[in-house]
Image (cartoon, rainbow, N blue to C red):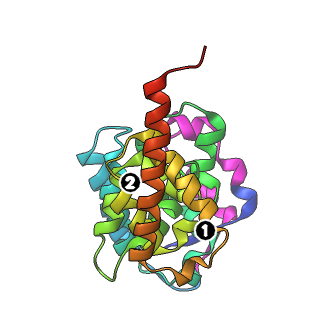
Amino acid sequence: MTLLQRLHPEAKRLVTPELASGELSRWSEQQTRSFVDPWIRPLSLEPAERVVKGVIERFEPFDTAIDAAAAPELHRSLPLSRAEAAEMSIWRFLAVVRYPELVRHRWENRSWASMRARFWASGVRPDSNLFFRLWWISELTRDGRDYSLTEQVLRKQQLATNIFVRALSAYRPAVAACVAVLSEVPAAIMERSIRDLNKALSTIVLEGCSEKELIKLLERIVGFNTIAIGGKAATGPSE
């Protein structure tokens, strides 16, 4: 049985262009043995293995639909507390040692800096460790066993990117408000409105706002930006 393990910080040297491109499929157990330690408790990776294989079988390489489909499944397959999931070493083990093929299947290797980050970096930005990102987005957006918000936000890649590069993404009602109001608005208005929402939230306590209050605030911001951006488009560039 394959168990979850920790990957040492010095193992960053294992994230090579060859691994990122697939020229090297995986490092051998002998090559990684000195970089790994047992995790705090036995946790089987068999459920996660099934998720990885299923995603690769069902989706074409680089399909953005992978995120919405894989995130809830990965979350369910790795039953971790938030304290446990904060340990970056386990996510690096999954991406670098155990399942590098999923990182390569989801992301095209267009930039070495970005691709390297998708194996190694912490965070929920698109340029961060794939497993960490998908697990934590699921954790931050689920409602018990209900992952509908997770799937909704990850189906809209541009929206997800704009939300999860900001601290407001850690507050589920804020993510829900953004999905409710911004999912169907034009990209320029969506991006500007999230920036304006982020500025507005700097003057209030985010956790004191309900989802309904945030929706009303965001609707006002979208209305203003629709007029502002629409007016610029109607008048055209100044001469």
- Does 142 appear in magenta? no
Q: Nearer the viewer, residue 86 or 204?
A: 204
Residue indicated by mark 2:
182
188 is higher (above) or lower (below) than 94: above
- The residue that appears at 47% across and 81% down in the rendered structure is 80
Q: Is residue 64 left or right of residue 231?
A: left
Q: Position of residue 67 (x, y in %)?
A: 37, 53
Task: Tell me, yes or no, if residue 62 can be seen here.
Answer: yes
Residue indicated by mark 1:
201
- The residue that appears at 30% across and 57% down in the rendered structure is 69
- The residue that appears at 34% across and 40% down in the rendered structure is 63
Q: Which residues are magenta?
A: 12-39
Q: Nearer the viewer, residue 185 or 18?
A: 185
Name the amino acid type tagged 1: Leu
Q: Earlier in the sequence, mark 1 or mark 2?
A: 2
Q: Position of residue 167 (x, y in %)?
A: 61, 66
* Crowd class of label 1 (few under 14; some 14 to 19; many from 20; radius 10 Å): some
Callout count: 2
33 is higher (above) or lower (below) than 157: below
